[in-house]
Amino acid sequence: MGEAASELNILVIEDDASLRRLLSEVVAKRGHQVVSAASAEEGLEYLPNWTFHVALLDHNLPGMEGLLLGEYLRRTNPDMMIAMITGTDDPRVERKSREHSLRFIAKPFEVEQVLRVIDEYIEAARERDEKRKDGEATDYEAPLARFADELPDCFGIPNVPSRIEERVVDAIKRSLNNLRSASRYTKRERVIALSGLITARVLGIGLPNVSSGRTMFEEYDHLMRERGRRTVFDR
């Protein structure tokens, strides 16, 4: 699932109960997950267990000011979209908000201003996803598919010990299984699976087909297509 997925986790911190409820309803109607708090300290308690994409913060909060929390969130979450929603007339708050790349929304506000903040995050996340895909597309430039069948002859390593064959096959199976799961898919598993498949070709190790009937090489490319990543063994 890309960073620009439709459902976002959004933190709302507002000590006015009616405004907190309004902001939460606006966010929820867009299909996003809302976590709300009445103070910065209460909001901070959620951070170890949540990954927030957007934060909507009041400035005049009991205890820690919203601006201080916004500055902290910006330092620790560079991609988060953070908006200061405040009725303060202190020009310092607006100036400091802009210095730390926090959106500034003055009260009373229009609902569209809040929705625009969410839309800006989604657009920025989509651009990051595209850049990441473009960068990953250059990870494996070598045309492996064209020459993969020649690798055993090039290296000529006959009679590979069975314990090595079993180790390679088990590692490939494990990584392919992890790549099938959105929660376990990582670039590390992708590299392990690809390394194992290339090793199998180099050593001439026969690999069993997966349950779908595809070869493990076909399965790897199938999983990469599902994730919008570059395939390797397609001809």
Image (cartoon, rainbow, N blue to C red):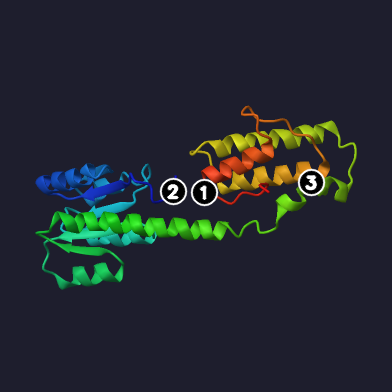
Mark 3 vs mark 2, foreground winner is 3
Number of the label disc, if any, that sits on residue 2: 2
For image coordinates 43% across by 59% down, the residue present is 128
Say few, some or many: other residues with alpha carbon within 10 Å of mark 1 (under 14 / 14 to 19 / 20 or more).
few
- Marks 2 and 1, the one that precedes in the sequence: 2
Residue 233 coordinates in the image, percent (x, y):
68, 47
The three-letter code of the residue at mark 3 reads Asp
Quick one: which residue is furthest to the front in this view? Answer: 235
Badge 3 marks a residue whose secondary structure is helix
Q: Nearer the viewer, residue 93 or 132?
A: 132
Say few, some or many: other residues with alpha carbon within 10 Å of mark 3 (under 14 / 14 to 19 / 20 or more).
few
Q: Quadrant of the N terminus?
A: top left
Tell me where residue 169 sits by quadrant. top right
For image coordinates 64% across by 34% down, the residue present is 174
Residue 70 coordinates in the image, percent (x, y):
28, 59
Q: Are marks 3 and 2 in contact (CB under 8 Å)?
A: no
Badge 1 marks a residue whose secondary structure is loop
Q: Nearer the viewer, residue 165 or 220?
A: 220
Q: Which residue bears the numbered disc 3? A: 149
For image coordinates 81% across by 32% down, the residue present is 163
Q: Which residue bears the numbered disc 1? A: 228
**Left of 34 or right of it: where is 233?**
right
Residue 69 visible in the picture:
no
